Amino acid sequence: MSRCITFWRLLTASVSVILLTNSAQPATADVGLKVATFDVDATPPNGTAMAYDIVKRQGELPLRCRGIVLLGAEQPIVLCAVDWIGIANAGQDAFRDALAKAAGTTRERVAVHTLHQHDAPGCDFSAEKIVDELDLKGYGRFQGDFHRLVIQRTAEAIQAALPQASSITHYGWGTAEVQKVASNRRIMGPDGKVRAVRYTATRSAALRAEPEGVIDPEVSLLSFWNNEKPVAILSYYACHPQSYYRTGVPSPDFPGIARFMRGQSVPDALHVHFNGAGGNIGAGKYNDGDKENRIVLANRLADGMKQAWDKTEKWPIAPEDISWQVEAVQLPPAEYIQEETYLKAIKEEAPRGYIARIDQLAWLRRCQDGHAIDVACLGVGRSRVLHMPGELFVEYQLLAKALRPDLDVAMAAYGEYGPGYIGTKAAYAEGGYETSQLASGVSPGAEAILNRAMEKLLGEQEELSGRILPKSPERALETFEVADGFEMQIVASEPQIQEPIVVSYDESGQMYVAEYLKFPSHHGKSDGPNGRIRLLTDKDADGRYETSRVFANGIAWPTGICPWKGGIFVVAAPDLWYFKDTDGDGDADVRTKIYTGFGFRNDEGTANNLKWGLDNWIYGAGSNSGGEIRPAGKSDAPAVSLRGRDFRFHPETLEFQTLSGSEQYGNALDDYGNRFLCSNSKPAVHVVLPARYLERNPYLSVQNVRTSIAKGTPLCA
């Protein structure tokens, strides 16, 4: 596809919705699944208030409201995606009720989402009611005449589209990584707090140079086919959609442009795009504010969509392959949203755009009236799409995919927009704009409620025979059985850690975790070193390590950590390193290689588990890859063979010695200096004869220096 595209003004903007129809509908009496599409205008006319500004002229591309209604499997299911900033509270009710009536279904089977463009309207009839109640001026963005007109047009278009429905024989699924678009907005400081927010346009070169952070790089495509002809393509990608805004010109921004490009490339199908859990995700790392970047970002997203399209696999589909489940949840409003306080402030303060106190007051009243949010899950064959509220953090989307790795999972967020931003529980203690009083309308307890809903919706689907599926940390904890007198608690979990190998604590109680992101190494994602050390801190001393940052990156295979003098020794075959942060920024600026030559035959057989001994030496397990160990930078120094041995070294003199031992993994010392090892088939092995005793008489023949002490072995029958 050419990266240079000429756009022309479209004379009429549109709203599109897809319908899968069944024999219960008079207009579509054929048996089986069908898809109907429709298109109506969602662009506000000149002089209309958008989320931040008044429309002063029309743009080259219109705003769209596109969605799907699935019929043919019990009652119809309506999905809708709108190029607006948000649809909240009573606005959600009005949209869903009108679309449900038009499609012949119930509100519970309708999901309405926005893409969250900022040069676009927002809809909240609950806030409109407050404006009228208080006779407020300057809040034209809540005036709902245009919103109601779009709702009416959409409902009419659905009714008109039903007789034109296309039969559906197959569905398709494809994914691909989008390159250089998404990055995490929240830049953490050494104290575990957000030190800067990398907004969608970031002019600071230093902030753009920060790592991408936690994102979901995948764009997912769910498609519906009539034999070889694609009828509708639904795409899902998590990222704030702004390249620039506050122009007074309605714009679908770069996701809408990417959608338009793909529509030109595959004109037979209607393209519907949903924003995923992108509350803490934006394009800031790759967007310095230059307006040329809108097309650059659009091309990159379109390229990812094309790759996902090229990788799409098709499967036959029947009505019984479609499912729709709903879990109604009530999210706790933030404690700082108080009726009297907010009413007083709203009357006195100047009107402002999203998110203002009037938005949050409308949400509070919604909660006080007992309204619940419908969290839904669409099942299409082995694909699942979760339909979620608010500006969710990407961690929710990553958890959803982790919960069902046996299925193809995507997420559409920005549904019910009343809550605003919805962070993780840990994020509220970290600070930053997204979880501040200016942005979030919920308390930290929202995470547990939404996680339980996702688990229930995804877990109720058919499981593969014999497969034990992953659980949330809280649910996993419930499955453990512990001996009397013991208690198990969660100290850290994803996303604070990822692929952990080993854990160590320093004298201040900080936690260092070795992570390896490329297991197994011979079939990994890249050829470069994908290990790293993560530093976690428990700031509130509650036993849960809520803050996390990468301490040292680009390490080959970290399998052992031992703190010393404010830094850490790390064994990562073929080397043993010392890392230390000397300037207080939380990153290891000291990276000193101490030894080299540790063997590496396979991932599970390298030197590991560095532990302090009673004699102030650091002990390590040699495992089964051996090695010829030399001080780093001294290739002519005599090598010490590690074959069939464990080792220890002195942290000050750096003297290196071999020891009796050499099991696969594990290295524990008791209060008397006895050493215990393990392997994947032997849970406990005692090193009975230390090498220093045997070295006194090299002529003494000893069959074995270690013995298994696990239950069932000769010593523990």
Image (tube, rainbow, N blue to C red):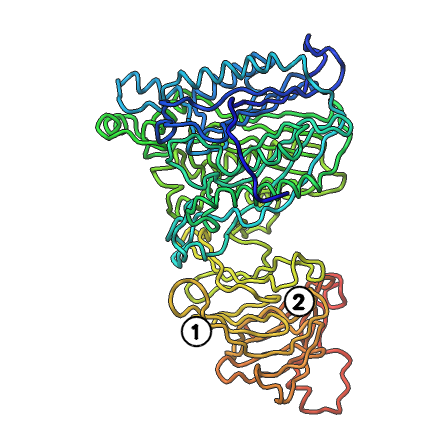
Q: Residue furthest top?
A: 26
Q: Nearer the viewer, mark 2 or mark 1?
A: 1
- Residue 685 place in picture, x, y as percent: 69, 69
The picture quadrant where one finds residue 665 is bottom right
Looking at the figure, which quarter contains the N terminus? top right
Q: Is residue 528 visible?
A: yes
Q: Residue furthest left?
A: 348
- Residue 102 place in picture, x, y as percent: 57, 12
Residue depicted at x 72% and y 12%: 23
Secondary structure of residue under mark 1 = loop
Residue 684 position (above or below residue 238): below
- Residue 257 place in picture, x, y as percent: 54, 36
Q: CA distance from mark 2 to mark 1?
A: 26 Å
Secondary structure of residue under mark 2 = strand
Q: Is residue 438 left or right of residue 473?
A: left
For mark 2, what is the residue?
665
Three-letter code for the amino acid on which mark 1 is drawn = Lys
Looking at the picture, tell me which residue is in the foreground, 565 or 507: 565
Q: Earlier in the sequence, mark 2 or mark 1?
A: 1
- Residue 516 place in picture, x, y as percent: 61, 60
Task: Say few, some or many: other residues with alpha carbon within 10 Å of mark 1 (under 14 / 14 to 19 / 20 or more).
Answer: few
The picture quadrant where one finds residue 410 is top right
Looking at the figure, which quarter contains the C terminus? bottom right
Three-letter code for the amino acid on which mark 2 is drawn = Tyr
For mark 1, what is the residue?
565
Residue 188 position (above or below residue 660): above
Residue depicted at x 69% and y 26%: 231
Task: Say few, some or many: other residues with alpha carbon within 10 Å of mark 2 (under 14 / 14 to 19 / 20 or more).
Answer: many
Residue 69 position (above or below residue 444): above
Q: Is residue 280 left or right of residue 344?
A: right
Residue depicted at x 69% and y 71%: 600
